[in-house]
Image (tube, rainbow, N blue to C red):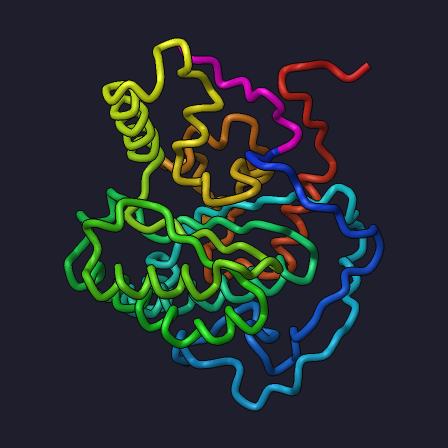
Amino acid sequence: MLSLRFAIPTANTLIPTKAKPKSGLVVQSGWSQTGLLSSLPKRYDYKLQAATTDLTNGRDSVAEKEVELPEGLSRELMPKHVAVIMDGNGRWARQKGLPASAGHEAGVKSLREMVELCGHWGIQVLTVFAFSTENWIRPKVEVDFLLSLFVRAMKSEIKSFQEYGIRISVIGDSSKLPTLLQKLIDEVEETTKNNTRLQLIVAVNYSGKYDMVQACRSIAERAKNGQIQLADINEILIEQELETKCSQYPYPDLLIRTSGELRVSNFLLWQLAYTELFFAQQLWPDFGKEEFVEALSSYQQRQRRYGGRHS
């Protein structure tokens, strides 16, 4: 049986890390009040605005500004990588007598707010579970809407992602996605690949089991071709073949799941080995700044031992 002990778990990185910023206030550039991911309402009523509205219209010129952390949060204890299972869009819509599509649109608004907060507070990577391999069994009209929502959202925000330094990475089996979406994913990833403010990893047609299977297939192919030997196969090699190899920080420090469900639902199964878990009662469209601060505060109060013991 393979051990899930990481060689250097506290590093949370596959490659040498960059120099850390000095503690204290975060220096931000360009997060204007009317710009990308501007201040969004934390709760939404029945009158939903279009989820893909370009929030950058009328924005001021890019300017440097300092953003303080919310009271009680420590910069030194801030997670580098936060993962989110965005659950509850459908239930949110049903509670309001709305179609499922309205819940997904409201969910996009919550995601925008979280991306903004991560950028302000110095979180390096945000990974979100947008569409699982199991979601194909949902009604076709809902699946078609979700896929079209991905297209509209990426088209409307690609310029803003680039301007504000957000790198987009998409993980999952893209071969089963519509051709238009595949091409758009390639375009967005290529356009934003050199951005360094925040990496937003979007899991689309993804599952943790799929990720490990594709890694094993890649390793088996290399062994078949004589590129590696049996003795070369170890945890590090497997981790280098997982889809999260696209990130400098591939292992989430904190996983948040909304809607009160207490499971990881086939998400990042290998990568979550030492991740701290936080389960929120709020449905995803109702998850905002206050709830995010609560999750981060809970994380910062925990001791991460990785199987060891503090003296």
Q: Nearer the viewer, residue 218 or 106?
A: 218
Q: Where is residue 1 in the image (x, y as percent from the top left)?
A: 39, 9
Q: Residue at x 64, y 44 (%)?
A: 80
176 sits to left or right of 155:
left
282 sits to left or right of 211:
right
Magenta span: helix, strand or loop, mainly? loop
Q: Position of residue 113 (x, y in %)?
A: 56, 65
Q: In which quarter of the image is the C terminus?
A: top right
Q: Which residue is drawn at 21% across and 49% down?
A: 175
Q: Is residue 54 above or below residue 308?
A: below
Magenta-drawn stretch contains 234: no
Q: In which quarter of the image is residue 96?
A: bottom left
Q: Residue at x 49, y 18 (%)?
A: 4
In the picture as drawn, the residue positioned furthest to the left comes out as: 140
Magenta-drawn stretch contains 5: yes
Q: Where is residue 288 in the image (x, y as percent from the top left)?
A: 57, 61
> How many numbered marks does the figure carry?
0
Q: Nearer the viewer, residue 75 or 72?
A: 75
In the picture as drawn, the residue positioned furthest to the front comes out as: 226
The stretch in magenta equals: 1-11
Q: Where is residue 142 in the image (x, y as percent from the top left)?
A: 22, 61
191 sits to left or right of 274:
left
Q: Is residue 51 above or below residue 207?
A: below
In the picture as drawn, the residue positioned furthest to the bottom comes out as: 58
Q: Residue at x 33, y 58 (%)?
A: 90
Q: Is residue 90 above or below residue 212?
A: below
260 sits to left or right of 27:
left
